[in-house]
Amino acid sequence: MPGEWYAGLKKPLWNPPGWIFGPVWTALYTMMAVAAWLVWKRGGFAMQRRPLALFLTQLALNALWTPLFFGLHWTGVAFAEIVLLWLAIAATIPGFRHVNRTAAWLLAPYLAWVSFAAVLNFTLWRLNS
Amino acid sequence: MPGEWYAGLKKPLWNPPGWIFGPVWTALYTMMAVAAWLVWKRGGFAMQRRPLALFLTQLALNALWTPLFFGLHWTGVAFAEIVLLWLAIAATIPGFRHVNRTAAWLLAPYLAWVSFAAVLNFTLWRLNS
């Protein structure tokens, strides 16, 4: 996905090497799937409507970020969007904790990574505009 | 998906019967897929980065609406979100037309339906708050 445009951006010194993103996202998506399953098995959508809706909201916001940043190169809009993603994850965690503490903990590394990604997104936006 | 909460909402007289949504969305998603394929086959992401990124943006915004409206019952937020969806579709159409006129036309019924859905969302929000 990155490609020429990303390669050509001015980067901060602490920019992580490109190969790190694949394994990190694979691990985060796996933990996300297990977390959602732990909540879902406690009565499905009928019983866990609100926490699962928050989860699906953050998942859709996660899906939205990639075309904004890498597709349209709208780095400022992508930053505003990742802030909404961060808020949606931060709202999902207490919703999950209410149902299953493990499910909530499984989202903690995800929130930490998105915090870092938001700072990186902000820095790339400011350095290149 | 609708369920009890939706059944209990105050509806306008022109509210469509529930059975209409399934076939309509099936037809719209099929047309969307064909449209994206017509654009994608003209050089893939490398050549059609911008129109395909606009398409993926509208697709993610489309995915976001359901948990906001039906999951969280945030009808006002869902209305604001469907306005963004409408804008993203309206931006995708000229991007597609530039590559393939048929692809653009295939999205016209989708834009018309989302216009109607936005008015319906607005009305349900105002009637029930």
Image: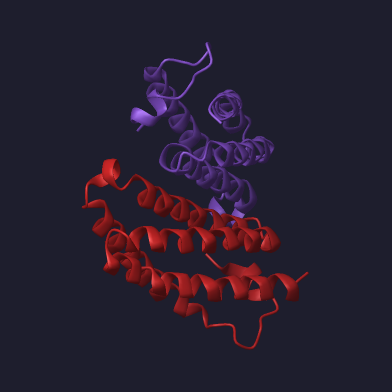
Chain colours: A red, B purple
Quadrant location of the C terminus of chain A?
Answer: bottom right
- On the image, the x and y values in percent for residue B85 come to 60, 39
- On the image, the x and y values in percent for residue A77 come to 67, 58
- Asked if residue B11 is positioned above or below residue A62 in the image, the reply reads above
The residue shown at (64%, 64%) is A79
- On the image, the x and y values in percent for residue B47 come to 61, 53
Residue A122 appears left or right of B110 = right
Residue B109 appears left or right of B63 = right
Q: Quadrant of residue B97?
A: top right
The residue shown at (36%, 64%) is A29
Q: Quadrant of residue A67?
A: bottom right
The residue shown at (51%, 70%) is A114
**Which residue occupies the extreme top position in the image?**
B13
Residue A106 appears left or right of B120 = left
- In this view of the protein, which residue sits in the foreground, A104 or B31? A104
**Which residue occupies the extreme bottom position in the image?**
A13
**Which residue occupies the extreme right position in the image?**
A129
* Residue B41 visible somewhere in the drawing: no
- In this view of the protein, which residue sits in the foreground, A27 or B98? A27
Q: Quadrant of residue B127?
A: top right
- In this view of the protein, which residue sits in the foreground, B81 or B11? B11
- On the image, the x and y values in percent for residue B115 come to 61, 26
The residue shown at (54%, 73%) is A115
* Residue B100 visible somewhere in the drawing: yes
- Asked if residue A1 is positioned above or below residue B99 in the image, the reply reads below
State the count of labels.
0
**Which residue occupies the extreme front position in the image?**
B129
- Asked if residue A73 is positioned above or below residue A9 in the image, the reply reads above
